[in-house]
Amino acid sequence: MAWVESDSPSFRARHSAGDAEDAAAVLRLLERTRAKLELIFPRGAPGGLTVVLHEHPAALALAQPTLILAWALTHPAGRRYLVGWPGSSELHALAPRVLRRRASSVAGSRELLDLAPAALYVRTVIAASNPTLPPPHTPRRLRRYLERAWIVEGTAQWFADQTAHARPAIARRLREGPRPTFPPGLRDASLLGGTLIDLLVREEGVGAAIQLACGRAGLDDEHALQRAFGGRPRDWTEAAWRGHLERLTSGTVQRQPLDTRGLSEPTD
């Protein structure tokens, strides 16, 4: 494959010569995501990243071997949407034309995949404000990610607007396999994590979600979750989340827009 490069004000794309139009669309998506996040995350939203668009999953896995483990650890209902991996200076993802072939026929599948590069970028934004999390993927940071994968993946999914399109995939997950744990375990983090962040934003606001992902107050995850939901008992939050899952899959929950009021001075 002959690689070519495309540029936008804050990003660069490396891609096949035949993917120039799709690469431009990905760069526009990343620019919109950066503009939305740069004023509300504690350390802003970094630019200067290169997104590498791969033509085949094998090439993606070769570039980011950690993704092979991630695929193995993810429930099949969410595995279809695990299509990239972030690095310190590069975001690796499948090219949009490959994502279009990967999408299922159910509503929302195409949109989830189209927004995947934005979710990868949000993970780098989180890492910029929380240096205990990857990228870079050092052993200590990767271990921390595995401990709180639902927070990282869920925050990335919500701020990339993927959660609004995940209903059919979530419905499939609830039909297949055992009852999800609370909070979502590693196997469900990339698909169900966003639903718990969605509940948090609805109840406590966008700032609470940012603080949960970026806070470094030394709390363990159990206490961080309790604090995020205003100190209420864990069982109450679990019951609220399971009810929220039912409403999401039934289509009775309206999309929650990003409200940045009160976030001009984010809390570190």
Image (cartoon, rainbow, N blue to C red):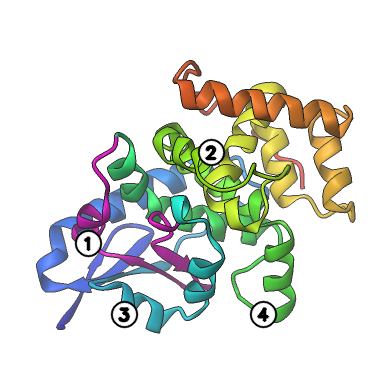
Where does the magenta region start and end?
Answer: 79-106
Q: Is residue 260 above or below residue 5?
A: above
Residue at the location (40% across, 54% down)?
A: 81
Comes first in the chain, label 4 or label 2:
4
Comes first in the chain, label 1 or label 3:
3
Q: Is residue 205 left or right of residue 225?
A: left
Q: Which residue is mark 3?
A: 59
How far, Cα to Cα, is label 3 from label 2? 32 Å
How far, Cα to Cα, is label 4 from label 2? 33 Å
Residue type at numbered disc 4? Thr
Rendered location of residue 83, percent (x, y) = 38, 62
Comes first in the chain, label 4 or label 3:
3
Q: Which residue is mark 2?
A: 174
Q: Which residue is mark 1?
A: 98
Determine crowd level at label 1: few under 14, some 14-19, many 20+ residues with C-alpha closer than 10 A: some
Q: Is residue 17 left or right of residue 120?
A: left
Comes first in the chain, label 2 or label 1:
1
Comes first in the chain, label 4 or label 1:
1
Marks 2 and 1 close (CB-CB < 8 Å): no
Q: Nearer the viewer, residue 64 or 121?
A: 64
Residue 101: quadrant of the picture? bottom left
Q: Residue 138 got which mark?
A: 4
Residue at the location (44% across, 40% down)?
A: 172
Residue type at numbered disc 3? Ala
